[in-house]
Amino acid sequence: MKIIVPVKQVPESSNVKMDPETGTVIRSGVETVVNPLDFYALETALRLKEQYGGTVTVLSMGPSQALKALKEAVAMGCDEAILVSDRKFCGADTWSTSYTLAQAVKKIGGYDLIITGERATDGDTAQVGPGIASWLDIPVATYVAKIEEVTDSRIVLERLVEDGYQILSVTLPCLISVVKEIASPRLPTLRGKIYARQLHIPVFSTENMELEPTALGLKGSPTRVVKIETPKVTRGGRVVKAGDDEGVLSAVDQLMAFLEAKDIV
């Protein structure tokens, strides 16, 4: 079984900043980490490899800094890693990103299963995984919480839905996105770190991929962020200071009067 796991390097949640001109996330000079939800996809792939045999290839689209995310995934147990990187990919929305990653998957070829995390913590759209499946014209199952069985031609799984679980039998090759309930991610091993350090990671770019130039990067993205605002929470109110027993009683009386006026008590 050949499994491909796309992962993303995202800014730490406390450091997310947006460029007001382009409407894209500012990534330069910002501390980045592997998207936390991608670890569940990696763990799922590694467990399937251990159970059924095969290989796991991790794939990431981004600048050269994304090599750090790829090496971390390899240190966990992935066999191969590929970086998809080119300045022409900058500013891509979910449509353009899924197109570029799908073309990278086509270049890899011979896959049985693609596993993604539920979503990325910076964009929070959960669109790229299904988008990849759409470009590749393969079945997709989202919010997968458990894998029951894998055969040469099908995968049987449980999807998390609003009122419980849905059991599906999906034809291979396919793409699945997984939720946290599926597994607890492992830590990188010392042997894995040594292997990752010496592993040659090829780069896919516009020079060695078959791509439609009009579908790349910011220019190839049909969605735009036209305005960015920081939410402001303003609450009107009245401050009552209670410096002694009489003040406390007065404050309680005022609070009760307020609650009664709002028909709360």
Image (cartoon, helix red, strand yellow):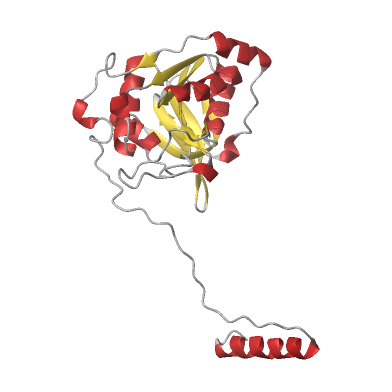
The front one of 1 and 241 is 241
Q: Position of residue 154 (x, y in %)?
A: 44, 26
Task: From this view, report whether residue 76 is shown above or below residue 158.
Answer: above
Can residue 137 be seen? no
Question: Residue 139, located in which quarter of the rendered image?
Answer: top left
Judge from the rendering whether residue 28 lies leftward or rightward of residue 186; answer left or right.
Answer: left
Relative depth, front residue between 139 and 11: 11
Assign the C terminus to one quadrant of the image.
Answer: bottom right
- Which residue is at a point 55% across and 28% down the rendered structure image? 44
The residue at 79%/86% (across/down) is 244
Can you give x and y, in whole percent of width and height, for residue 33 in the image?
A: 53, 32
Residue at screen point 34% across, 21% down: 104
Image location of residue 260, percent across then percent down: 60, 90
Q: Residue at x 64, y 27 (%)?
A: 186
- Report the front residue among 131 and 137: 131
Decide: is 89 above or below 204. below
Can residue 127 be seen from the camera position used here?
yes
Occupied quadrant, residue 192: top right
